[in-house]
Image (cartoon, rainbow, N blue to C red):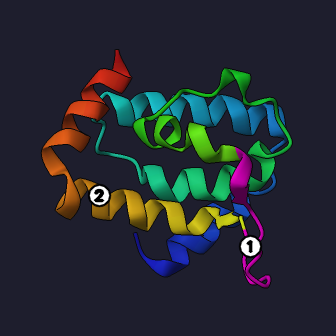
Amino acid sequence: MLPSQEILLRSFLSGLPPATAAELARAIERDRRQNGSGLPHDAILKSLRPALRQTDPEGRIFTPLRLFCQPFEDLLMSRSGQVKLKGRIARESISPVWGWIGSTLLPAETQHYSIIAQD
């Protein structure tokens, strides 16, 4: 996706009402789970995050990454650019760690975990 397209997408999606953003996020997560490849899943979900924070997380689809984060989700901090707080984990640091675990540290186990998480 070109940077200008991502900016347009982000500006459009950031204006959605929280309920609509939640509905769209469920559809995007469902498509990604079914190995859909025609949509920029990560860019869409990243753009929806501000609106999704205002909704009830009950309706969200539990992705392998979200399940991985459940044990320490109360330690996650959403605001970037702030001073590092002891005992807090920046949400933006989770995705690179998950990528490292899945590609380098434990690739077979991560793939197996992802398959189990989808059931």
Q: Quadrant of residue 61?
A: top right
Q: Residue furthest front?
A: 86
Q: Nearer the viewer, residue 80 or 88?
A: 88
Which one is in front, 34 or 38?
34
**Position of 113 relative to 118 (above/below):** below
Residue at figure coordinates x 71%, y 33% from the top left: 22
- The residue positioned 77% from the left and 55% from the top of the image is 50
Residue shown at 40% from the left, 31% from the top: 31
61 inside magenta stretch: no
| Dot 2 amino acid type | Ile
- Secondary element under disc 2, as helix, strand or loop, is helix
* Residue ID for mark 2: 101
Distance of mark 2 from mark 1, alpha carbons? 23 Å
The image position of residue 76, as x and y in percent, is 69, 56
Could you say where residue 119 lies in the image, as x and y percent from the top left? 34, 14
Left or right relative to 39: residue 29 = right
As drawn, 55 above or below 78: above
- State which region is magenta: 74-86
Q: Main secondary structure of the magenta part?
A: loop
For this orientation, the residue located farthest to the left is 108
Q: Which mark is residue 45?
A: none
Q: Which residue is mark 1?
A: 86
| Position of 34 relative to 109 (above/below) | above
Residue 13 in view here: no
Res. 113 image quadrant: top left
| Whole-percent x, y for residue 13 in the image | 70, 53
Left or right of 22 in this view: 107: left
User: Callout 1: 10 Å neighbours few (<14), some, many (20+)?
Assistant: few
Amino acid type at circle 1 is Lys
* Residue lying at 62% horizontally and 62% vertically, measured from the top left: 91
